[in-house]
Amino acid sequence: MEKSKTMKQTGLLILVVLCFAGCQKEEAYEKPAPPVRVQAVEIDSGEEGPRYSGSIEPIIRADMAFRQGGYVEDILTVTGEGGQRRLVQEGDSVTKGTVLVRLRQSDYLAKLNQAKSQLAQAQSALEQTEHGVKTAQVGRDKAKLDFDRANALFKTQSLTKSDYDGARAQLDAAQSQLDGGQAQLELARGRIAGAKALVDEAEIAVRDSTLHAPIKGVVIKRLVELNSLVGPGMPGFILADLDIVKTVFGAPDVLLPSLRIGMPLSVSTQAIPGAKFNGRIARISPAADPRSRVFEVEVTFANPNHRLKPGMIMSIQLPGARRTDPVPVIPLTAIVQSKNDPNGYGVFVVDEQGGKIISRARDVKLGGTLSNRIVVREGLRAGERIIVIGAALVHDGDVVRIVP
């Protein structure tokens, strides 16, 4: 009876396991939604020529770093408001050659004095060696004369063999002493060269412990404080010459035929309302940026009284005809190759379906460029949302995730 009861329990357990396994469903793999950035199609009302934007940058900039490490002992001071002396700071002007910062000199002067002491010892040893060589030279010359006299007497049998051998031995000893002195002289000269190299190295270290302004300009950034510890390669100051500045904007390929080096352009900024700055194109990049697909164009212009500051946003006006009809415009980054026409273009429009954001491919016909945007002649309406970042990562019908 116990055996029958055990069999029933075992069968019941197997039945429960089978029921549990049958109730489970295999979950289908769901592809993660790629992140994209979207933007509504805008309408451009038309204005006198296309307009581009860029930021102000100095043409000449000096990033100054320390070649040596140490503690900051001194920083340039200037006269501030109220006649008070203060440390130089961002916005202050400095002249070329001005000492901006100096590291603690005692660390470097000690090494320099040690190197000079070694040089002095080497020079003293050289003088002693030179004196010894001169003395040895005199002794060798005297021994040579004695030997020549002894040799002449020995040939006439006026000198004994032992006296002749003694004269010969004295000459050999004097020559050996002279050779040894000359060898010591070469070693002493080598020590002199090594000591001079140490002095030169120590003097360079002393000079490198001080940062001088390499240009006449404005302090853009001061990166050190008094008594702070700096290491080799650490930046100390950033200077810039703001007499002439530049701005760079991205131009599409269709605009390149109308641009040329030296072409005058009008530049303005909202930071200085009503002011116009006349610039000229100084550089046109020979290759487009692989991501944005635009060519860098550099415009330079004078900056009287340094009214323009690095980082200000500038608006560059390009000559062109006035458009009368409003047109839809989209960023260049939204354009992809058409799936239906290898020579055509398209975009991805996003639409909400069932609580999900779906991407839909749509062919478009493009017009001219307006700044960093392009005119859409057919295929889009104002207000439709399109993918402007991440379009190359999605396909028609994909679920996407909108990010700011």
Image (tube, grey):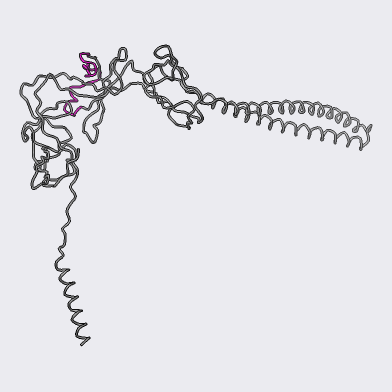
Between residue 214 and residue 294, name the one nearer to us.
214
Q: Nearer the viewer, residue 123 or 28?
A: 28
Quarter containing the N terminus: bottom left
Compare residues 339 and 403 and report the one nearer the observer: 403
Q: Is residue 88 left or right of residue 282?
A: right
Q: Position of residue 354 (x, y in %)?
A: 8, 48
Q: Quadrant of residue 92?
A: top left
Residue 256: x, y in percent? 19, 25
Would residue 387 be found to the left or right of residue 189 on screen?
Answer: left
Which quarter of the figure is the C terminus placed in?
A: top left
Which residue of the protein is positioned furthest toward the bottom in this rendering? 1
Whether residue 308 is visible, yes or no, is yes
Please state the extent of the stretch shown in magenta in the rendering. 251-275
**Image coords of residue 44 (percent x, y):** 10, 26
Whether residue 283 is visible: no
* Residue 136 x, y percent position in the rendering: 79, 29
Is residue 84 in the magenta section?
no
Task: Check residue 262 for magenta coloring.
Answer: yes
Displayed quadrant of residue 185: top right
Residue drawn where x is 32% and y is 12% of the image: 305
Q: Residue at x 27, y 22 (%)?
A: 312
- At 72% across and 32% down in the image, what residue appears? 184
Number of numbered discs visible in the structure rendering? 0
The image quarter containing residue 174 is top right
